[in-house]
Image (cartoon, rainbow, N blue to C red):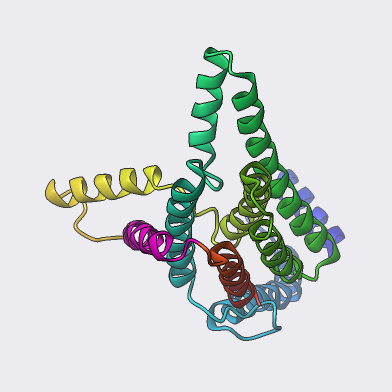
Amino acid sequence: MMKKYMLLCFIALVRSGQPATKTEIDTWSKANDSVAPLVLASNASALESNSLVCRGGGSADQRRVIHPLFFSSSMAALAGCSHVLCIKRFQCYAAMMTGNIISLGVALAEANVSEAKFRSSLLASFFAGTMCARSLESRSAVCKDKQHHKVVAPIVAGVFAIADRIPDHQKRKLVLLSASYGLVYATANQASNATITQLMTGHVTKLGAAISDCVGKTNRCANTGTITSFSILVSFTIGSALGAMVARVGQEKPLFTILGFIYAILILLFRG
């Protein structure tokens, strides 16, 4: 087949500007007829593969039990709840590294070595969790089995449960929780095509731009990204309110163990 194309290219170069002969036309037709079915078959295979993912057919790893918007919104609600619980219990964030980086900078400026070490440990722990998630995902891609979520889910549930049972040692608890959140949100962001669900600044910016476009008549149609950002913002707010109520009445309950199991179930349902 490649020889036929090379021959055709050579003839085209030699005879540029001249009409094609009957023999050349016949040669081209035969080559084109032999290639067309292969191209159509390849495209049909790709379309079938994509349609299986969208409609939930194919293998177990191609099916998504829950809708992507529900998954992203649920992750945002859990993030809001987690942030509030951490602030209420530990006066510190375990799932949002921006606050820890700011606190690290302040601690360094004030020469507070102990606080700087603690904030650095939280950052390193979250970083390790994201590296672990990425490593599992890469290994799964090499093996072509797409089973990494089935490994991540029980690890997340287990580490959350262990952190909840560490007695009277907030720093160790927070370090474990940070690693778990790094693992959770690295996996969630990859599963939802890089949609950030634990931080809201980007979604507020996107929503503000969309409202401005609607008011200015630039674009009156709300796209999928705008709807997703709005849903994530609302879910995050509801999750934060729920976290505040739970923190007030459930001081002695294993709240992070419960959160860990909910995270694990969502990851399994969305990717399983």
Magenta segment boundaries in residue numbering: 227-251
Relative to residue 115, is residue 99 drawn left or right?
left
What x and y, as percent, mark residue 21? 70, 62
Principal SS element in the magenta part? Answer: helix
Nearest to the observer: residue 29 or residue 92: 92
Nearer to the camera, 5 or 24: 5
**Residue 272 colored magenta?**
no
Which of 166 and 198 lies nearest the eye of the viewer? 166
Asked if residue 237 lies in the magenta stretch, the reply is: yes
- The residue shown at (74%, 58%) is 137
The C terminus sits in image quarter: bottom right
With 117 as the anchor, is 11 left or right in this view? right
In percent of the image, x 43 and y 69: which residue is there? 69
Residue 110 on image: x %, y %: 52, 14
Furthest residue to the bottom? 57
Q: Residue 84 appears at what percent x and percent y?
A: 42, 52
Compared to 9, does 72 lie above or below?
below
